Image (cartoon, coloured by chain):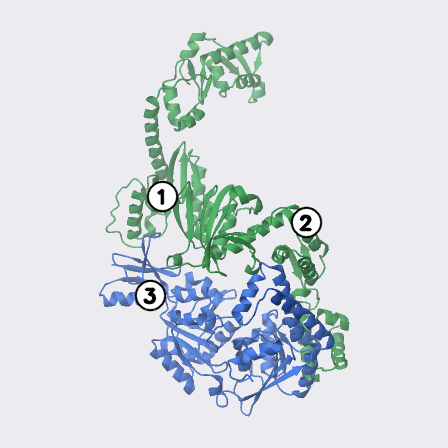
Amino acid sequence: MLPSNLLVVWKRKGEILPRYAKLSNDNLEVAGGLIETYKENVGEKKKVLKAVVTDLENRGYEYRFVRGLALLLDRKGTFTCNSKINPVDLRRKIFQATEKSGLPTTPEKRQRIIDAAASEMALTPENFEEYLYADLDDELILEKFTPPSAHELLEQYNLSLSQTLLFDSTELSFTASGNWQNLFYFVKKLGLIYEVYRDNGLWVKIDGPASLFKLTKRYGISIAKLLPIIVANPEWTVTAKILWKYTNEICNFKIESQKHSSLLKKTNLPAVTYDSAVEESFASQFQAVKSGWTLKREPEPVPAGNQVIIPDFSLERGGVKVYLEIVGFWTEEYILRKAEKLKQVEDKMLLLVNEDLACEKLTALEKRPQLNFIYYHDKIPLASILRYLGTAFEMVKDREIKFLENLSVKFTEPVVSYDEFAARIGISTEAAKAVLTVNPPPGYVVMPNILVSKEKLIQIDNQIEECLKQSGKLPLTQAIRLIEAKGVSDASCALTQLGYKITWRGINSEQAEVTKASKKREDEVVKSPAP
Amino acid sequence: MPRLWFDKGTILLKGEVGTPYGKWDPRSGCYRLKASHYRDALEYFKESKIRYEDDVPNLPPLEQVKSNVELRTYQNKALDNWSRAGNRGVLVLPTAAGKTFIALKAIDLLRTQTLIVVPTLDLIDQWRKRVRECLGMEAGVVGGGENTVRMVTVSTYDSAYSQAAQLGNRFMFLVFDEVHHLASPGYMQIGEMYIAPYRMGLTATYERSDQRHALLPLVVGDPVYSIDIEELAGKHLSPYTYEKVSVELTPEEQQTYEAQMSVFRNYLQQRRIVLKSAADFQRFIMTTGRDPHAREALLARNRALRVAVNSEAKLNLLAERLEAYKDEKILIFTLYNDLVYTISRRFLIPAVTYQTPREERREILVNFGNGKYKVIVTSQVLDEGMDVPDASIGLILGGTGSTREYVQRLGRLLRKKEGKTAKLVEIISKETMEVGISRRRRLKTGEAS
């Protein structure tokens, strides 16, 4: 972020945009030149750097641009005081000396005082004079400098310009693809209030509590802090209202990833930290049980009437989504309000309520066994949650199975994966598998993950037989390669299906061999049940 | 039953009733009020005989007050006027007239949770010391890296503003030191985001050149008491004399000055710009953002001003005066920091600027107070509120055209001491724009000749 006197904007007909520094050769040259200056002047005083900046300004470069770059470079450097003795001590020495001698109004008297003080501090008079004010900003020494590339500097400059403009914003709206968790985490953390609405995708409008009463720039700084989090996503559009103080008008600001992404620095997002230990321990416990559900932290907002709920977690499995929220300290009224809100949610939402954290006695709220409330003591009951998830999943699965049974599907491809098939028609893999394995389409054999056409199996059978004929034996690894090359992933299952036997010598699969057992006839192959 | 609670600098109201002050907030599904309407809302409920549940305040515990504050007659009058205005309003008193004590007495009378809002970290230290000495308790501090809330808490305007969401429901009484700061657009919201019904503003210079002081009654109350330097000089403040000395620029300085000024004047002439008022000048400054020629003209003007203000001739005169006032305590004021350091180096005088480390500044002021150091040179930071020990001579080598700055500098000299007559000497460069600047700053004090 930059001081507002370095902000340069382009403003026309109510639109406002920072004057971004294009990554042009000209600008890269200025940026690169400045970076070189800083590199060359490690060990020199800050006023030397300032002089270079002033020189650039005098040569006609936009002074706010040049100073902005220099300020960002200052932040990449470490400035230290040159003096071995703290200048404050030197000054105290000299001021105390003048207490006795009186102020020097002639150069000779002054020199005498300096000489005496210097020799007391074991310094030469020249050094004494040099160190006397070595702690002033201009006199500091550039000790270390971590040079960015010219590209990075310009990108950082452009991002800082945008943030500086947003200091004067009264509200901001954005839409983004990517990390909603992070975005909402920061919105909450920055004390902002959001509203969600749909307009060609999900939009979030951000302002603060006091924005209700009048236009205020109070939240501008928080809004500016949010910008790097938004633009770190792959796709985004940001609009904002800027209260332009010089003319006292509201201007529209709009940037979008397609046009501006390349100009702006992409920050590395900090990892999301958990609000509470409860949430954190739940997340790690849940992930440890390998339930088949994918756990996601602070997923995208769930509309609830004209409001939204930002659940703590979403759980996903094969197209089934369940939201989960952990309730901390609560009152009866809070829970009732929550229940009211939940009625408006179309998605499945599970609320975990710790009975020990109730802030009052429960009267109106009988403990109705509502499907989406789980009460507990002490520890979050993983088993109950999994049971709920199981039920939720079964319900969806049953519906999907009915749907699929009423669908007439014709297969032409030799290999059908349940996964791909389920994704194609928009149901869970489990439902697809349930239907296809119980009632396989004619001409196909059921395997754990796929259906394989009879023709395909015969092809494979012939090829293996060929190999066995030639060398008398076939290593398992080679057989698997051969089968997989045909596009069949469940290789060992295919072998068993075709009536081959795998003979193991030790546990090393390299040494296992495929041999012929009771070779089935081709028509039997097709009828045999799934393993 | 309607329930009210505090939410990030505002008040939320849930229930079947509204108030004349709230506004429906569709984002939260309930009414939202400005925190400053807290008392109004409660009174409305009481008058309408509506029972309500109030979860708004979150006040730190009260502590024992052991007050030893005795007020002078005019201070008592000021406090009376304030109480009669419903414990609200602004008191306008010159520097050194003891504004602090009036506020401390008010805390003693109200015995309620109080936040004192001040412009600088130095002032935090001063108030903390005064609270300890006069009320017999430790003050909490918010700002400058500290964050403790107690019955009496001191904070900077910056912290009071940025932390309004956390602090707004923790006090019932707000004291604004140097209250003219509150009128700036951002800080005005401090007034709106705190529930405290009792409010006191203190200042020596109520009026702002941007006229925004007209907004202060909305958040603090009207000016309820005002007394100026003339009324107190002699009795409660020291009498003083004023002298203006003009020096001639050296020939080289004269040449540079003329050359730079002609760049500036030529530009104005070419563009037919007339700069008569502060607003004219502000408009000109704005064009410098777009027009490189305007900026070049402005820079030339500033270079000329710098030559005039920092003239070598002034330093020679300064040397003479330092000889002449050998045994007096002197404050030297300049416009620019670089002149501060030039003087500090040449005459080995302690310097105080925004760059001076806080510890060193304190040490210098203590030593100035006990008379070890006789002279301090400074640019601006001493101008406001800072409790500078008394000096008898002020040497102004440069300043802005602001009356406020001038009055505050003068105030530094006027702390009452038996037999003392303060002396203010202004040294300006002849036939430069400094003459006009000097006239402007003294215009409203009724002294300008």
Which residue position is annotated with label 1?
Answer: A303
Q: Which chain is green?
A: A
Question: Which residue is denoted by mark 3 in the rendering?
Answer: B38
Disc 3 marks a residue whose amino acid type is: Tyr
SS for dot 2: helix
The local secondary structure at tag 3 comes to: helix
For disc 1, the chain is: A
Classify mark 2: residues with Cα within 10 Å, few (<14), some (14-19) or many (20+). few
Is residue A203 at least partly visible in the picture? yes
Three-letter code for the amino acid on which mark 2 is drawn: Glu
Q: Position of residue A400 (x, y in %)?
A: 34, 27
Image quadrant in which the C terminus of chain B is located: bottom right
Pointer 2 residue: A29
Which quadrant of the structure image shows residue A287?
top left
Q: Secondary structure at mark 1?
A: strand
2 vs 3, front mark: 2
